[in-house]
Image: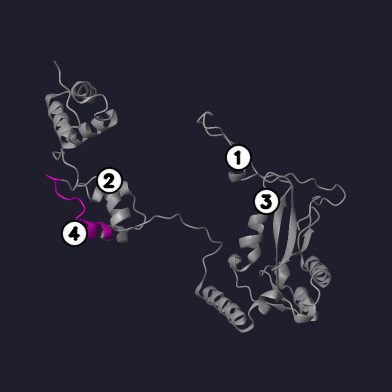
Amino acid sequence: MLRKIESPAKCELRSVIRFLHAEGSNAAEIQRRMSKVYGETFMSDSKVRKWCRNFDAGCTDVHDAGGQGGKPVSTDDLAQRVDQAIRGNRRFTIFGLSDLFPEISRSALYTIVSERLEYRKPCARWVPEMLSDHHKTQRMGAALTFLQRYHHDGDEFLDKIVTGDETWVHYETEGTKEQSKQWMHSHSPSRKPVRFKRAFSTKKSLATVFCHRKGVLLVEFMPCGTTITAASYSKTLQRLRRAIQNKRRGMLSSGIVLLHDNARPHTAVVTTILLQRFGWEVFDHPPYSPDFAPSDSHLFAHMKRWLGGDKISPQTTSCRPAYRIG
């Protein structure tokens, strides 16, 4: 009568696989023969094939890495050599690194890199422009000026800031993956719901938004086929001044600090003369610094997420969306 062996050691299973493989048995035959003695779940078929490949490659160790009967894989000398290899090429892959260290497995290499050396491999972040030393100096100067003003005036300085920018608003904005989530019962099919990615609608309108720390001050949509010029931006600033006068009483008399980017209509001579006539202070915005404008980094991101899945009907007379923000 055939007696089954309960709870065998891993090194015992690997030794038997090595013996049968040396006899000439293939992985399927080894799986069938060993399952009679050790049970059907003694080892998965993929692991049996893996150990057959290891023995074909010349592996002779049947013990766990670092366990009894085997040498510890991650030594100080090995970790130091791996660290030197990574410093020589920061874009390495585990497969490429294994060519330099064929004596250890890729899984052991990954453990050394991620756990012992604590390396991470984040994706690169796109930036609009490579900043020169002059641009970096301007950014630092603008940031220090802002901090000094806040240190001196506190919230009074923040109450004076009005910021604004332009963004494209599509008549049909695609919803996010988060907005496509659905409640499902536990007994529902395990397949996840799918959604097809669509191209953005070509129909869109350019929106100009100005806001204050207490809320939106002005939203304007450009007519179809037009672009922002110094003349049109100056008219927008005049309407902004009336909006501040109506919505924020006393703010004009206390002083306005305008924060907008350095686009050509914003820095044109006509615009500069108008702002000087208003008596507004224009805060310095360094070139290639979209993160300095709160509209790009905060307002528009939330606005696009809020518009996700909505359709905006354009008015036929002015080609402007029949939709208002704030």
Other-residue count near label 4 (Cα within 10 Å), few / some / many at <14 / 14–19 / ≥20: few
Mark toward the start of the polypeptide (4 vs 3): 4
Q: Is residue 120 magenta?
A: no
39 or 113: nearer the viewer: 39
Which residue carries the number 4 mark? 77
Which residue carries the number 2 mark? 106
Query: Residue visible at 39% across and 55% down?
Result: 121
The quarter of the image holding the C terminus is bottom right
Q: How far apart are marks 4 and 2 (CA)?
A: 17 Å
Mark toward the start of the polypeptide (2 vs 3): 2
Q: Which residue type carries mark 1?
A: Lys
Question: Is 27 rendered above or below residue 92?
Answer: above
Residues at discs 1 and 3 in contact (Cβ within 8 Å): no
Q: Which residue type carries mark 2?
A: Arg
Image location of residue 270, percent across then percent down: 78, 74
Residues at discs 4 and 1 in contact (Cβ within 8 Å): no
Other-residue count near label 2 (Cα within 10 Å), few / some / many at <14 / 14–19 / ≥20: some
Q: Count of labels shown?
A: 4
Q: Which residue type carries mark 3?
A: Trp
Query: Residue visible at 33% across and 58% down?
Result: 118
State which quadrant residue 84 falls in.
bottom left
Query: Residue visible at 15% across and 31% down?
Result: 18
Q: Distance between the residues labelled 4 and 3?
A: 54 Å
Question: Is 10 rendered above or below residue 121?
Answer: above
Mark toward the start of the polypeptide (4 vs 2): 4
Image: magenta residue range: 68-83
Residue 306, labelled with which disc?
Answer: 3
Which residue carries the number 1 mark? 197
Image check: 92 left or right of 42? right
